[in-house]
Image (cartoon, grey):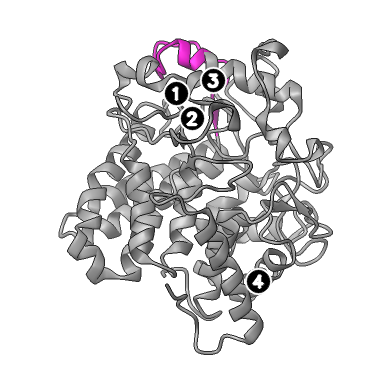
């Protein structure tokens, strides 16, 4: 396997490529890539999408396999579960484990796979974008294997699940039912909605994550008890979206923006297959309009989350509210406002910090170490770099690209880093950090976000 490098790659860049490639090769299981063997020993949904985006530079075939494995565990109702469990991994290696989720029995009515154990919740829909980029890395191989032809109906069913089953507010914006679903597990944005959730008893769960990570970097026991309670309630009600009283129902701008990006990618995939891209383009426009109407806040200068139970915006600023920058046809006035917020005092990109933090630097709940309450993450910064470049903010994008690569190398491909010091947090040799490093290294600074 070889990395597709640019002709002008420097010796340090080539060394960084080799290091990143070693991480992905070490974390490959034969059918998919684990985020981290010690901390996350199964297959995660949005992790695999980001991993495939980088893996395509090592092996387009393996990148295709990554997405095929994940989508092979899709439920009949269209949902793509956030974890696909490896039966060879001991139950005590991760919690919640397959015996907690019980997808093959509790999820039977919604078409959970009969022979593959999964979780019952979802993660952000980055998969269509990943499939499109993987296809473009080797169109001939993709055509020979029927890669897009086989994945397209699965990807359209996945988006249809989110736009249909999850429109709890009735305004065209999908809702998440668990803090793990938007991928930003313990963001301060969830503190108020989570306060309605009765915690699970402390003796009803075990935290395997604390054996592979520092407690100061991870969610608190109190938050984790609420996560377990929400997941158990969903499971005990057969993973039904409708007809169930959900305590946590939130419209998240990052999740919604990635669904818009996914519809744009599906339009391109449809065109590649000779189908009409129009329905996907129209759905992307409707989603963008609904997201703007429901979640944009002019005063905050950022998109905010909405608590659907109370129909109120959550005032906390998080990096999720900046991710609509990745939407290719976002209104130019909104783009300019988001860039001002990204580079202003609340997120400090290019002044206070070199990577965008996951939460408002000036927020009362900001914590530079604890999971999604302040640290900088490589996947969100990759999305911001892509969005900035796509909207013509190339100088800011170039600077962010260099910062991502520097931080990835210096931190040992950390899961996340302190945004002020760059110190590694969470685990190291993290797969999506290595994968997105390869992707940034494989394209020149002047290239747009199309690739």
Residue at image mark 3: 231
| Label 1 crowd (10 A; few <14 / some 14-19 / many >=20) | many
Instruction: State which mark lies toward you, 3 or 4.
Output: 3
- Is the residue under label 2 in contact with that under label 3 (CB below 8 Å)? no
Inspect this view and state whether residue 261 appears: yes
- The mark nearer the N terminus, 2 or 1, is 1
- The mark nearer the N terminus, 3 or 2, is 2
Residue positioned 40% across, 28% down in the render: 117
- The mark nearer the N terminus, 3 or 4, is 3
What is the number of the mark on residue 396?
Answer: 4
Magenta stretch in the rendered image: 233-251
Residue at image mark 2: 175
Residue positioned 70% across, 62% down in the render: 412
Residue at image mark 1: 168
| The image quarter in which residue 325 lies | bottom right
Quadrant position of the N terminus in the picture: bottom left
Residue 400: x, y in percent?
A: 66, 68
Residue 155: x, y in percent?
A: 31, 45
- The question of residue 243 being in magenta is answered with yes
Between the residue at mark 3 and the residue at mark 2, the CA separation in whole angstroms equals 15 Å
Q: Main secondary structure of the magenta part?
A: loop
Quadrant position of the C terminus in the picture: bottom left
Between the residue at mark 4 and the residue at mark 2, the CA separation in whole angstroms equals 32 Å
- The question of residue 441 being in magenta is answered with no
- Is the residue under label 1 in contact with that under label 2 (CB below 8 Å)? yes
């Amino acid at each position: 396997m070889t990395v597709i490098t640019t002709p002008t790659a420097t010796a340090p860049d080539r060394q960084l490529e080799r290091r990143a490639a070693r991480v992905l090769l070490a974390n490959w299981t034969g059918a998919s890539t684990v985020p981290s063997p010690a901390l996350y020993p199964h297959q995660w949904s949005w992790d695999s999408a980001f991993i495939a985006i980088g893996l395509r530079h090592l092996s387009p075939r393996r990148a295709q396999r990554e997405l095929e494995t994940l989508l092979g565990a899709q439920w009949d109702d269209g949902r793509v579960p956030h974890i696909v469990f490896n039966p060879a991994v001991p139950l005590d290696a991760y919690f919640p484990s397959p015996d907690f989720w019980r997808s093959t029995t509790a999820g039977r009515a919604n078409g959970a796979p009969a022979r593959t154990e999964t979780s019952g919740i979802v993660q952000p829909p980055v998969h269509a974008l990943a499939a499109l980029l993987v296809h473009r890395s080797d169109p001939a191989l993709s055509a020979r294997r029927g890669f897009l032809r086989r994945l397209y109906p699965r990807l359209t069913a996945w988006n249809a699940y989110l736009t249909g089953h999850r429109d709890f507010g009735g305004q065209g914006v999908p809702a998440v039912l668990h803090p793990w679903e938007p991928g930003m597990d313990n963001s301060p944005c969830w503190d108020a909605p989570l306060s309605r959730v009765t915690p699970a008893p402390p003796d009803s769960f075990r935290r395997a994550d604390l054996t592979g990570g520092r407690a100061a970097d991870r969610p608190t026991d109190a938050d984790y008890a609420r996560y377990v309670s929400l997941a158990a309630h969903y499971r005990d009600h057969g993973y039904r979206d409708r007809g169930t009283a959900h305590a946590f129902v939130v419209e998240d701008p990052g999740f919604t923006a990635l669904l818009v990006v996914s519809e744009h990618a599906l339009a391109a995939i449809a065109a590649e297959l000779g189908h009409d891209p129009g329905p996907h383009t129209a759905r992307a426009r409707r989603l963008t309009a609904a997201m703007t109407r429901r979640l944009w806040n002019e005063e905050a200068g950022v998109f905010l989350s909405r608590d659907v139970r109370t129909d109120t915006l959550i005032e906390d600023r998080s990096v999720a509210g900046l991710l609509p920058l990745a939407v290719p046809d976002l209104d130019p006035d909104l783009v300019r406002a988001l860039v001002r917020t990204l580079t202003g005092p609340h997120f400090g990109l290019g002044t206070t910090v070199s990577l965008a933090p996951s939460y408002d630097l000036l927020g009362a709940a900001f914590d530079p170490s604890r999971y999604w309450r302040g640290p900088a993450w490589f996947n969100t910064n990759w999305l911001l770099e892509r969005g900035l470049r796509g909207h013509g903010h190339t100088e800011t994008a170039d600077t962010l690209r260099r910062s991502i690569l520097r931080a990835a190398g210096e931190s040992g491909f950390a899961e996340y880093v302190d945004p002020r010091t760059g110190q590694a947090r969470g685990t190291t040799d993290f797969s999506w950090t290595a994968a997105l490093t390869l992707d940034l290294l494989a394209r020149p600074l002047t290239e747009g976000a199309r690739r």
